Amino acid sequence: AQGLPELREAIAHHIAYARGVHCSAADLLVCNGAQQALDLIARVLVEPGCQVAMEDPGYSPARQLFLALGARLQSVPVDDEGLCVEQIADGTRLIYVTPSHQFPLGMPMSERRRHALLARAAELGALIIEDDYDCEFRYHGPASDALQRLDRHGLVAYVGTFSKTLLAELRLGYAVLPPAVLQAACVAKHLSDWHSPTLLQWALARFLGEGHLNKHIRRCHEVYSARRDRILARLGGDLSAWFSPIPASAGFHLSALAKPGVDVELLANLARKVEVGLYSLAPFYSEAPVRPGLLLGFGAIELLDIDPALDRVRDTLQRLS
Ligand SMILES: Cc1ncc(COP(=O)(O)O)c(C=O)c1O
């Protein structure tokens, strides 16, 4: 159930190099995507009434998962430095965060907050789930390692995936878990689906072992970087009357906050009619006051298609103004 040793070995090597994660193959569980890793961790740790804290806005499927297991969920606001750690309630047992690229806003968690979060988790005796979903494409600034690297007390369950670096259809991800959680999660994995597909695991182990993933990431970096730069140039140029981007240094999407007077929902609806997919940030909020804005993905759009799409967005905004 834990996953092919060859693949675990290769992943441990990769995430030590790429994300600074401290682990060996023995600490790893191979899962069907990050989503299954979250599910298994939650299943072994959350019982009805268990207090769980997560970012607001945040990754809604994680919220739904914790609620489905009967958690008492605290939605903790985020600011420019990430999760507002000082607001995590007493009694919290589990804290879910996306420190490298806050989902959906995109900013990384500051160093200061990372230390504060680890200290708060230690004080509470809580486990932190670090969802490092969208972390491997970094565009500028000093590379920030995973939160897990700073953890000296086994408080972090680190979750990663190949959905972004390779493809989501692979459904292969992993979790690096403290020993007590690992054992229970392996049992849960076995009871859920025995193991992730062995042939795929072999193929991926070989792909990683032969160094293709790093080459692939290096090659793609230029492509995504150019797309991101183009969107940022437009947001800082002719779209700046309506939006300002949130600084982010990694990932496949960036978010932009709407300036007063912009009706983001209406804009997204009208944009859809001219075949531009814009996503409002509002649905990712739970209790925190919504800061209206857009999530702009660039994983699937060609560089040459960005300007024509943003021209249509600008024309729509001009008509609405
Ligand atoms: C923040 C976050 N975590 C986890 C996942 C799940 O990823 P996977 O495809 O590896 O299951 C997603 C998918 O969109 C996500 O946005």
Image (tube, rainbow, N blue to C red):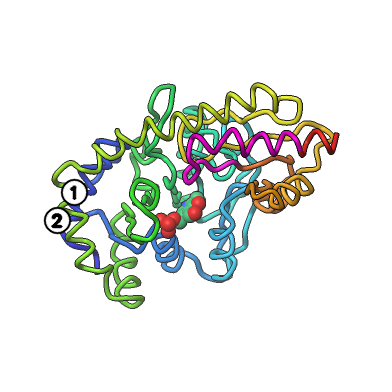
Query: From the image, which quarter does the N terminus lie in?
Result: bottom left
Which range of residues does the magenta coloring cover?
A: 296-315
Nearest the camera: 21 or 136? Answer: 136
Left or right of 279: which side holds 292? Answer: right
Secondary structure found at label 2: helix
Looking at the rendered structure, the kind of residue marked 2 is: Glu
Residue that badge 1 annotates: 10
Q: Residue at x 28, y 65 (%)?
A: 183
Magenta stretch encompasses residue 227: no
Magenta span contains residue 313 = yes
Residue marked by disc 2: 6
Q: How far is mark 2 from mark 1, CA to CA?
A: 6 Å
Position above or below: 211 against 142:
below
Residue 25 at what x, y percent from top left?
19, 52
Percent from the top left, x then y, of residue 19?
32, 37
Q: Is residue 77 above or below residue 179?
A: above
The structure residue drawn at horizontal position 73% and vertical position 40%, both measured from the top left corner, is: 291
